[in-house]
Structure formats: structure tokens, C-alpha cells
């Protein structure tokens, strides 16, 4: 195949795009690993899930960096992030939003819930009732929310990073099979190894690293 042939000209832009994408993903991963130290495989899986427009289910104990992972990922691609703490008394409208009566306008107006973010962290998702869990189904599958017969699109990219407690723990509800099917991947972060713990103890605190973790790629360039 000669350099000037049509086939070579067709493959050149594709190779260039793939090269730019690989470089962008490498920079994002390095940015996130400044916060989630010693877990490159977890960061890689989260990025693959994001690029596939999927959702990630994290099964692990509290305090291993689940929320830090989501916030660092959102900041690295210049996205919004929200966090929902699932509890037994959480209502579906607490997630999707609801219509509130506006006395000045003499009409109802929609107040978006925390689901209207690019990356949504759902902590302990299996502590909520099945009714509340089902509120996530349409959002995760169709990237939209329907409230009072009105449909509102979600932003792009949209990714749910949900955590769940072991089903043996008291006060948990098993995730329905339909909702488990919405997750592209499932991962366990685990505790860091001794070398990573030493690196974290001698470096900047995690809260500061997360705050200073700036965007290495905009969401439109990376995920558009």
C-alpha cells in the first residue's frame, strides 16, 4: 500500500484520532491516580466504563475511596458530580427531582434532583427500598428522567458509580436483576498495599489532592 493511495488516506485520520484518544485517557488516568493511589486497575476500569457510556458498581467496605474516585474522575474531564446517600426512607423524587408550585408564576416548575449531573455517586444503593431503586432504571438505560408526564434529558457524559453493602448486612435490599443489568462493570477497590499507604501518608492529604485535581480533558473533547 503506497502512502498516497486512498486506503492509506482513509486510515490516517482514524489512527490519528485513536492516538489522541489514547493520550487523553493516559492523562486522565494519571490525574485520577493522584487521588486514588495504588489502584491503577480500578482507575482503568472506571475510564473504560465511562468511554463505553456505561455505569460502574462498586462492592466494598466504607472508606476505600469510592467517592474520591468519582470526584477525581469528574474533575479530570471537567464534569459535574453529585452524591446520593441511599437510605430506607429515601423517595424516588429525592433522586429525580419534583415539580414545585411557584406562587409568583402561578404554575408548577420542575426542580431537578441530584441525578442531573454528569457523574452520580450512589452510596449504599441497596439500603434503599426497591421502589426507590427502580427510579434509577430509566435514568441509567435511556439517559432521561420522566416526572409528571414530562421527559427531561440528562447531560452527556452520564455515568452512575454506585456502591453497595454486602447483602448479609442488616437493612439491605437485594438489587433487582433488571437494575444489576444496567451496570456495565462491577469492581472491588480494596485497601491499598503497604507501599501505597506509605506514599499517601507522606504526600498531600487526599482531600487536598482531590480539590487540586484539575481537568486534563474537557468532557466534549474526551466523550463527545
Image (spheres, grey):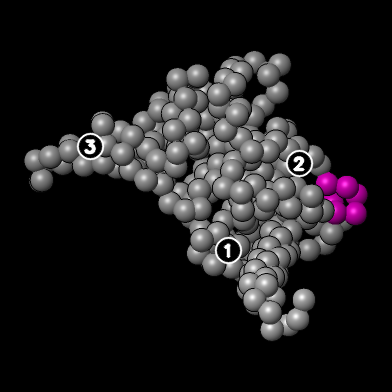
* Residue 94 to residue 36: above or below: above
What is the CA distance from the residue labelled 3 to the residue labelled 2? 40 Å
Left or right of 73 in this view: 37: right
- How many C-alpha atoms fall within 10 Å of the one at disc 3: few (<14), some, or many (≥20)? few
Q: Position of residue 203 (x, y in %)?
A: 78, 63
Asked if the residue at tag 1 contacts the one at tag 3, i.e. Cβ–Cβ closer than 8 Å, the answer is: no
- How many C-alpha atoms fall within 10 Å of the one at disc 2: few (<14), some, or many (≥20)? some
Q: Position of residue 109 (x, y in %)?
A: 21, 42
Considering every residue shown, the one lying at the far bottom of the view is: 4
Under circle 1, the secondary element is helix
Under circle 2, the secondary element is loop
Please report the residue visible at 68 percent of the width from the left and 79 percent of the height from the top.
5
Sequence order check: which comes first, mark 3 or mark 1?
3
Read off the magenta span.
192-197
Sequence order check: which comes first, mark 3 or mark 2?
3
Q: Nearer the viewer, mark 3 or mark 1?
A: 1
Q: Position of residue 157 (x, y in %)?
A: 51, 53
Numbered label attached to residue 189: 2
* Residue that carries the numbered disc 1 in the rendered image: 222
Foreground residue, 185 or 8? 8
Q: Within the image, what quadrant is residue 22 found in?
A: bottom right
What is the CA distance from the residue labelled 1 to the residue labelled 2? 25 Å
Foreground residue, 135 or 21? 21
Numbered label attached to residue 119: none
Left or right of 153 in this view: 42: right
Please report the residue visible at 26 percent of the width from the left and 31 percent of the height from the top.
148
Numbered label attached to residue 100: 3
Q: Position of residue 223 (x, y in %)?
A: 55, 59
Amino acid at each position: 500500500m503506497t502512502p498516497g493511495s486512498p486506503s492509506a488516506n482513509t486510515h490516517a485520520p482514524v489512527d490519528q484520532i485513536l492516538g489522541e484518544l489514547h493520550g487523553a485517557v493516559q492523562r486522565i488516568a494519571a490525574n485520577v491516580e493522584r487521588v486514588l493511589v495504588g489502584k491503577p486497575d480500578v482507575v482503568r476500569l472506571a475510564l473504560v466504563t465511562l468511554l463505553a457510556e456505561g455505569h460502574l458498581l462498586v462492592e466494598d467496605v466504607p472508606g476505600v475511596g469510592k467517592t474520591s474516585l468519582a470526584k477525581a474522575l469528574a474533575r479530570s474531564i471537567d464534569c459535574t458530580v453529585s452524591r446520593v446517600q441511599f437510605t430506607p426512607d429515601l423517595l424516588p423524587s429525592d433522586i429525580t427531582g419534583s415539580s414545585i408550585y411557584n406562587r409568583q408564576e402561578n404554575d408548577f416548575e420542575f426542580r431537578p434532583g441530584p441525578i442531573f449531573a454528569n457523574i452520580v455517586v450512589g452510596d449504599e444503593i441497596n439500603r434503599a427500598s426497591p421502589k426507590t431503586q427502580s427510579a434509577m432504571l430509566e435514568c441509567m438505560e435511556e439517559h432521561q428522567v420522566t416526572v409528571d408526564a414530562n421527559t427531561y434529558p440528562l447531560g452527556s457524559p452520564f455515568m452512575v458509580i454506585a456502591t453497595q453493602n454486602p447483602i448479609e448486612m442488616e437493612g439491605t435490599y437485594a438489587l433487582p436483576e433488571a437494575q444489576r443489568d444496567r451496570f456495565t462493570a462491577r469492581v472491588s477497590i480494596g485497601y491499598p498495599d503497604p507501599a501505597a499507604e506509605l506514599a499517601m501518608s507522606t504526600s498531600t492529604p487526599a482531600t487536598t489532592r482531590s480539590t487540586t485535581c484539575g481537568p486534563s480533558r474537557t468532557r466534549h473533547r474526551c466523550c463527545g
